[in-house]
Image (spheres, helix red, strand yellow):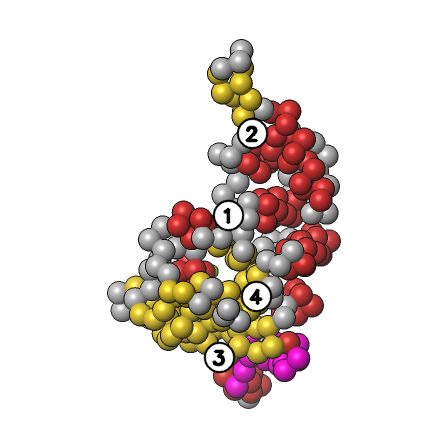
Amino acid sequence: MSDYILQLEDISKFFGPVIALGGVTLRLRRGEVHCLLGDNGAGKSTLIKILAGVHMPDEGQYLLEGKPVRFASPRQALDAGIGTVYQDLALVPLMSVARNFFMGREPIKQLLGFIPVMDHALAAATAGDKLRNMGIRIRDANQMVGTMSGGEKQCLAIARAIHFGAKVLILDEPTAALGVKQSANVLKLIATARARGISVIFITHNVNHAYPIADSFTLLNRGKSLGTFPKNEISKDEVLDMMAGGEEMHKLIADLEGVTI
Ligand SMILES: Nc1ncnc2c1ncn2[C@@H]1O[C@H](COP(=O)(O)OP(=O)(O)OP(=O)(O)O)[C@@H](O)[C@H]1O
Ligand SMILES: [Mg+2]
């Protein structure tokens, strides 16, 4: 059995003349939280869109549990156990928590003995139970998603992916718009996913969020990987330094120090 649940080997993706990814390798170990860090335009979203079946790579190989795969659509990736939570979440604000939790997979009952209809009571009770089991307290599963806070919505989207059997969970900046307490709740839920054996790719700009939870880090810079580092081989300051562009940033600051205004 392969050590890695998922591998991108030497992947390139071009958009016309733009090299969004130029020969990037990313290997995700089973049951780890792997942080993908990088500045704006580094290629993070392009990389997860390849993983999620939105884009096909132009070069390189995508392996799932050691076997080459080609996903022609997000549905195919989802069916293979790759659950992706995008920044815009794909939740429906005017539908209830329970409807959003099931989204097309609602429990059905027979009306008058033969007309299939959604079982609202069972859906609300089941969604409420499942969310509570993952440490998420929802006042009322019949509540509209539009009335929930940003953090609650993130938790709901992640919980849904876990419940429906994701083996790999990909989270694109789940804490970007959240305050301290809400971010902590999302980080706790990531730990819950890992405890259930799910492998997680966590994309963020925020090293303070990444460092406590991550088992390893891959840093992207302008479509290239700066490498993958297990947590015991890299300090938080070193991650910050690499994120800031390392030497380039030091040079920029040094140049600025010489400027008289
Ligand atoms: N559909 C597209 N068409 C053309 N260029 C694209 C497309 N998607 C991404 N790019 C380009 O590829 C590069 C990488 O973009 P990407 O969105 O992957 O970066 P990112 O690391 O997610 O950045 P951010 O932190 O700002 O979200 C950028 O130069 C971007 O303009
Ligand atoms: Mg992005």
Q: Amino acid at mark 2?
A: Pro
Instruction: State the CA–CA distance, disc 4 to disc 3.
Output: 22 Å
Q: Quadrant of residue 52?
A: bottom left
Q: Which residues are magenta?
A: 232-247
Instruction: State the CA–CA distance, disc 1 to disc 3.
Output: 28 Å
x, y percent for residue 21: 38, 70
Q: Amino acid at mark 3?
A: Leu
Sequence-first disc among 4 and 3: 4
Closer-to-camera residue (66/236): 66
Closer-to-camera residue (138/39): 138
Instruction: State the CA–CA distance, disc 4 to disc 1.
Output: 27 Å
Sequence-first disc among 2 and 3: 2
- Residue picked out by circle 1: 88
Mark 3 secondary-structure assignment: strand
- Outermost residue on the top side: it is 112
Q: Are marks 1 and 3 in contact (CB under 8 Å)?
A: no
- Residue picked out by circle 2: 107
Badge nearest the viewer, 4 or 1: 4
Sequence-first disc among 4 and 1: 4
Q: Residue placed at 66% from the left, 80% from the top? A: 232
- Residue picked out by circle 3: 226
x, y percent for residue 194: 64, 59
